[in-house]
């Protein structure tokens, strides 16, 4: 009973700490700093090679890639530490409760090791597929932002043929198709 109450109290404290962490210290400051530094680099690159770094590409990186990097790398480290602590405490608790049953401890130890081995091999085997899907998602996000940027630019320059709205409808339909492909890629 005391152990269950202790775990409940630890969970309440952990949830409160996580809430405070998400409100006060999320990756927002990291995102801000990274965007600031990237914008400085993009402005420097405009002097060196403006053709390679058009505005749409820079904006897409500032929007999508920064969020992806912070969410999937920076904040993942904190989640990984949290999950590892949970795993260690769970395994330690199970082995402590079964301290008098060596046979069960050996069996559970073997099962835990096999599960860990399977998870690691699964991640290693799927890595090329995950990287490929992430690149496709990124490329279609760039394509969507590029199409939107070019359409707005062409509209401002008066490069569309008719004034009957047919060009607008065609361009919006094309943009809708591109954004739908991006949307489908975003779910992977």
Image: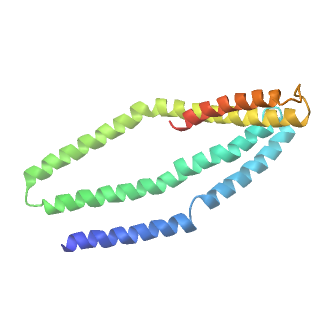
Name the side, left or right, on which 107 lies relative to 23: left
State the residue lying farthest toward the top. 161
* Residue 137 lies in quadrant: top right
Q: Residue at x 76, y 30 (%)?
A: 169
Q: Residue at x 55, y 33 (%)?
A: 184
Which residue is nearer to you in this view: 45 or 132? 132
Which residue is nearer to you in this view: 75 or 11? 11
Q: Residue at x 64, y 44 (%)?
A: 64
Name the side, left or right, on which 77 lies relative to 55: left
Q: Residue at x 56, y 38 (%)?
A: 186
Residue 158, position as x, y percentages in the image: 91, 32
* Residue 175 lies in quadrant: top right
Q: What colour-coding does the image apply?
A: rainbow
Residue 123, position as x, y percentages in the image: 40, 37
Image quadrant where one finds the N terminus: bottom left
Whether 45 is drawn above or below 159: the answer is below
Residue 39, position as x, y percentages in the image: 76, 49
Name the side, left or right, on which 124 lies relative to 109: right
State the residue lying farthest toward the right. 158
- Total numbered circles: 0
* Residue 163 lies in quadrant: top right
Name the side, left or right, on which 184 lies relative to 17: right
Whether 106 is drawn above or below 156: the answer is below
State the residue lying farthest toward the front. 164
């Amino acid at each position: 009973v005391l152990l269950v109450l202790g775990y409940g109290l630890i969970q309440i404290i952990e949830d409160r700490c996580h809430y405070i962490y998400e409100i006060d210290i999320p990756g927002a400051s990291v995102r801000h700093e990274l965007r600031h530094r990237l914008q400085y680099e993009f402005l420097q690159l405009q002097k060196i090679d403006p053709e390679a770094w058009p505005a749409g590409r820079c904006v897409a990186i500032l929007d999508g890639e920064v969020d992806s990097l912070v969410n999937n790398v920076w904040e993942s480290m904190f989640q990984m530490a949290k999950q590892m602590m949970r795993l260690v405490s769970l395994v330690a608790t199970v082995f402590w409760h079964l301290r008098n049953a060596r046979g069960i401890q050996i069996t559970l130890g073997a099962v835990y090791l096999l599960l860990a081995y399977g998870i690691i091999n699964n991640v290693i085997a799927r890595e090329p597929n995950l990287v490929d899907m992430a690149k496709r998602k990124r490329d279609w996000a760039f394509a969507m932002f590029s199409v939107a940027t070019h359409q707005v630019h062409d509209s401002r320059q008066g490069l569309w043929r008719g004034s009957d709205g047919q060009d607008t409808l065609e361009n919006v339909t094309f943009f809708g198709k591109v954004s739908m492909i991006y949307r489908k890629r975003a779910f992977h």
